[in-house]
Image: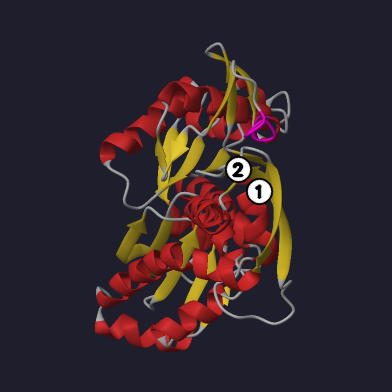
Amino acid sequence: MFSRLARLFSSDIGIDLGTANCLVYVKDRGIVFSEPSVVAVKDDKVIKIGMEAKRTIGRCPMNIRAIRPMRQGGIADPAITEEMLRYFIMRARTFMSPRQRLIKPKVLIAVPSGITEVLRRAVEDSAQKAGAGKVITIDEPMAAAIGVGLPTGEPTGNMIVDIGGGTTEVAIISIEGIVAAKSCPVGGDDMDQAIILHMQRAYNLMIGERTAEDIKMRIGSAYPVPDLEEYMEVKGRDRISGLPKAVNVTAVEIRKALEEPLSSIQQAIHTTLERCPPELAGDLIERGIMLAGGGALIRGIDLLISRENNLPVFIAEDPLKAVANGTGIVLQELDRITA
């Protein structure tokens, strides 16, 4: 009786707690917001969270630090993560009715498939301290596969590659379970760092994370593609003279700079395919590989992965929202099962 009343008066929350971004899903309302997983701290006190904090990266005075509390899918700073989750949960509850706010929400959080039990428990503890009621975790590749609409409940092979900011989750799924998986600690952040390193080596130019991300999105690619800008002007600080400097960078050299992180992602895909049972491997010839996450937006990445694995590759309709949408679908199913 109490559980039925709790379902009537509460509204559950799904969270894609990513290294780069956090997406929050409120049951019956969908994804209500997406914010960068960044916290600005002044004198050990949190002053900004999300987009406002991200704007301070590389622009902070000495007494303010911009922190990314999530690293490679795990919690790097438990106290700051707790503050960030508290802010996100409180903000999500503003989308609920006054009646629904009377009971602490059940929170479903997507975590990397390769995370240790200690780190999984750390995520659960942080969410509970931040104001959640019951906390449940789900593997990110499973949530992503559900979110993009793959038939995960059928006895057929479905392969998902979720390229996030700090990790790439690769999994082969069948009958609502993960048959083979690989969590690779490489993602969009590593691509940004590869661009930063290239600018230092090639031009003695110092640039920040935000500039590197802008380069990646404007002229970055994994494979030669038509209609891509040939070059862009990049501004930064000369490493030798210390003075402001601008250079023209080509799309070809950025593609070469991205080869190393992309190779690591490809190796994770190859390793997972090697672990795939023969019967399910046959399914993948027809069904192919589905790409999700922000990394799926890198131009030509589907062509690169298809060429390397000799399989068809598809990009999800809305890859950034795949995991968050998956948590929402799972929350609906949990209510149906416990009804």
Residue that carries the numbered disc 2 in the rendered image: 208
Asked which secondary structure carries label 2, the reply is loop
Quarter of the figure with residue 137: top left
Q: What's the residue type where badge 1 is placed?
A: Thr
Residue 245: image x %, image y %? 70, 47
Q: What's the residue type where badge 2 is placed?
A: Gly
Judging depth in this view, the residue of 220 and 159 nearest the camera is: 220
Judging depth in this view, the residue of 234 and 85 nearest the camera is: 234
Residue 83 is one of the magenta-drawn residues = no
Q: Residues within 10 Å of mark 1 (few under 14, many from 20)?
A: some
Residue 274: image x %, image y %? 26, 76
Residue 57 is one of the magenta-drawn residues = yes
Using the rendered image of the protein, determine whether residue 30 is visible from the camera's viewpoint.
no
Residue that carries the numbered disc 1 in the rendered image: 211
Q: Which residues are magenta?
A: 53-59
Q: Determine contact: label 1, label 2, CB under 8 Å.
A: yes
Residue 283: image x %, image y %? 39, 85
Q: Is residue 298 above or below residue 130?
A: below
